[in-house]
Image: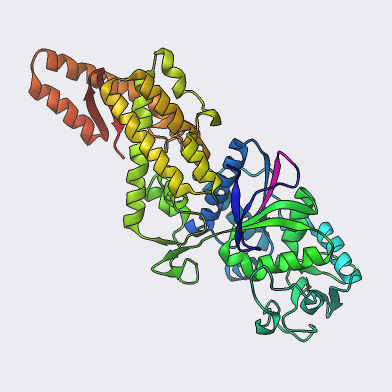
């Protein structure tokens, strides 16, 4: 089956046909760094990380460009409120986003351009728009003339005569039409500015992404992604200014659904933000990734602690099988199933689900079915069956970014069994288990149970198996 994706522009599922055979370019609207990230922000990162992983598993040389908006009205307001430099706010929060993406196992982008580093490209784009009659300079700013582009509104399915004012400037006096949007904002006292042929100032939000995406992916590229809340006005304006300038721009538009709390959009202003830094203190990062990635990317998530708990339990079932299976195969000829995996082990139903507009819910059903079969093979001591299922499960989890034996989950304190501290903990637990085994052999079951209970109190769970005791850290 060929990969098919839902294209917002055509409102239909389309077969993915890349601009260049065997290659795929993806531009993802990243963070506007006025505040630390909540799970609504990072859901987009997880969803499109799965897309990049699937493109690469399918054989594409996929390039991910994810931008950073480091100059914006919101950033300037935060800086003014805190009495600090605007760049300090941007730098602090960009680092927080980088930590959050890494914590949830998102692969780093191939390029992560900052808006402030691409003002020359923005100036060139504005010049093209002015020359072609689609933009004009007025009052120190530069504005896009929405009436000059008859297709304006087609991406979001809106009509121009039903639209409200852009509301992106303090006053509409300099605009020909209140719905015209700012490409460049004239300088204000105390604000950062850059020199242009039309006067000093700073870029408008929409201009930034058009300049950065085409610089790194070309005038025409394959996929533009982002949250559904960006569809209008941001993506609508990106498309209008880029195509009116003569660029083919994005050939497919993908939008992920939002995360809500009690039916309300998650936002700092509503006070319902679930910050990633706080969430990963309450639940392991791999479990949070499973929660954010398990739903179809276009669906809405209404957060609840119960739903997060169910997702964590589901991931632990998968993790438990992978860990036990790898231990069972250690030292056997079939032990290669515990080594790094390849897409060659992917079951056909999993691949079919992923090719169907990234059908992660259906793909996870295949994962859990393989886990059930693998647990049956473990119970029966079927080494060949264990190896086959482990290879399949790990290959599928690699696509989803959830393989517990691979980085980042297999390294560091957040790993499934203590990560970097595993050798030390293993040595200490082994001593206790040897003492427990000696007590059992002399039929001193009270001492044996006492050792097991003390280990459990310390957070170490002991399971007696036909191959001897095994342990894991309490979740």
Q: Position of residue 296 (x, y in %)?
A: 48, 54
Q: Is residue 148 magenta?
A: no
Q: Is residue 321 above or below residue 313?
A: above
Quadrant of the frame with the N terminus: top right
Q: Which residue sits at x=28%, y=23%?
A: 429
Q: Is residue 386 above or below residue 162?
A: above
The overriding secondary structure of the stretch rendered in magenta is strand
Q: Position of residue 167 (x, y in %)?
A: 67, 79
* The residue stretch that appears in magenta: 21-27
Quadrant of the frame with the C terminus: top left
Q: Quadrant of residue 57?
A: top right
Q: Nearer the viewer, residue 35 or 30?
A: 30
Q: Position of residue 116 (x, y in %)?
A: 74, 58
Give the residue furthest to the bottom: 173
Q: Is residue 25 magenta?
A: yes
Q: Nearer the viewer, residue 71 or 40?
A: 40
């Amino acid at each position: 089956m060929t990969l098919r994706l839902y294209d917002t522009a055509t409102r239909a599922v389309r077969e993915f046909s890349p601009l260049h055979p065997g290659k795929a370019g993806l531009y993802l609207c990243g963070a506007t760094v006025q505040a630390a990230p909540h799970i609504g922000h990072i859901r987009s990162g997880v969803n499109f990380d799965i897309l990049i992983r699937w493109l690469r598993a399918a054989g594409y040389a996929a390039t991910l460009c994810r931008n950073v908006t480091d100059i914006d009205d919101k950033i300037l307001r935060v800086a003014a409120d805190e009495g600090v430099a605007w760049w300090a706010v941007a730098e602090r929060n960009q680092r927080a986003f980088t930590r959050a993406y890494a914590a949830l196992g998102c692969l780093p982008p191939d390029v992560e351009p900052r808006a402030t580093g691409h003002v020359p490209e923005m100036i060139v784009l504005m010049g093209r728009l002015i020359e072609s009659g689609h933009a004009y300079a007025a009052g120190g700013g530069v504005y896009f003339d929405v009436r000059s582009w008859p297709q304006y509104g087609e991406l979001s399915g809106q009509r121009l005569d039903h639209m409200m004012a852009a509301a992106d400037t303090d006053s509409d006096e300099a605009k020909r039409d209140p719905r015209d949007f700012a490409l460049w904002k004239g300088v204000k006292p105390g604000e950062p500015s850059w020199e242009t042929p039309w006067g000093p100032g700073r870029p408008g939000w929409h201009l930034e992404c058009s300049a950065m995406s085409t610089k790194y992916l070309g005038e025409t590229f394959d996929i533009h992604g982002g949250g559904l809340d960006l569809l209008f006005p941001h993506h609508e304006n990106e498309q209008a200014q880029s195509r009116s300038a003569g660029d083919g721009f994005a050939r497919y538009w993908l939008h992920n659904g939002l995360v809500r709390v009690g039916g309300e959009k998650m936002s700092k202003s509503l006070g319902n933000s679930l910050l990633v830094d706080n969430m990963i203190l309450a639940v392991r990062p791999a479990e949070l990734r499973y929660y954010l990635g398990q739903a179809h990317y276009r669906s809405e998530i209404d957060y609840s602690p119960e739903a997060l708990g169910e997702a964590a339990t589901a991931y632990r079932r998968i993790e438990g099988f992978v860990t036990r299976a790898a231990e069972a195969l250690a030292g056997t000829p079939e032990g290669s199933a515990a080594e790094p995996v390849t897409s060659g082990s992917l079951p056909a139903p999993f691949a079919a689900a992923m090719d169907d507009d990234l059908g992660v819910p259906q793909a996870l059903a295949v994962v859990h079915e393989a886990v059930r079969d693998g647990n049956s093979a473990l119970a029966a001591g079927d080494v060949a069956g264990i190896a086959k299922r482990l290879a399949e499960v790990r290959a599928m989890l690699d696509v989803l970014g959830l393989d517990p034996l691979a980085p980042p989950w297999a390294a560091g304190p957040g790993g499934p069994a203590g990560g970097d501290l595993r050798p030390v903990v293993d040595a200490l637990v082994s001593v206790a288990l040897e003492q427990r085994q000696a007590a059992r052999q002399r039929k001193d079951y009270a001492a044996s149970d006492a050792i097991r209970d003390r280990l459990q109190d310390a957070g170490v769970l002991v399971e007696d198996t036909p191959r001897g005791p095994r342990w894991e850290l309490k979740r």
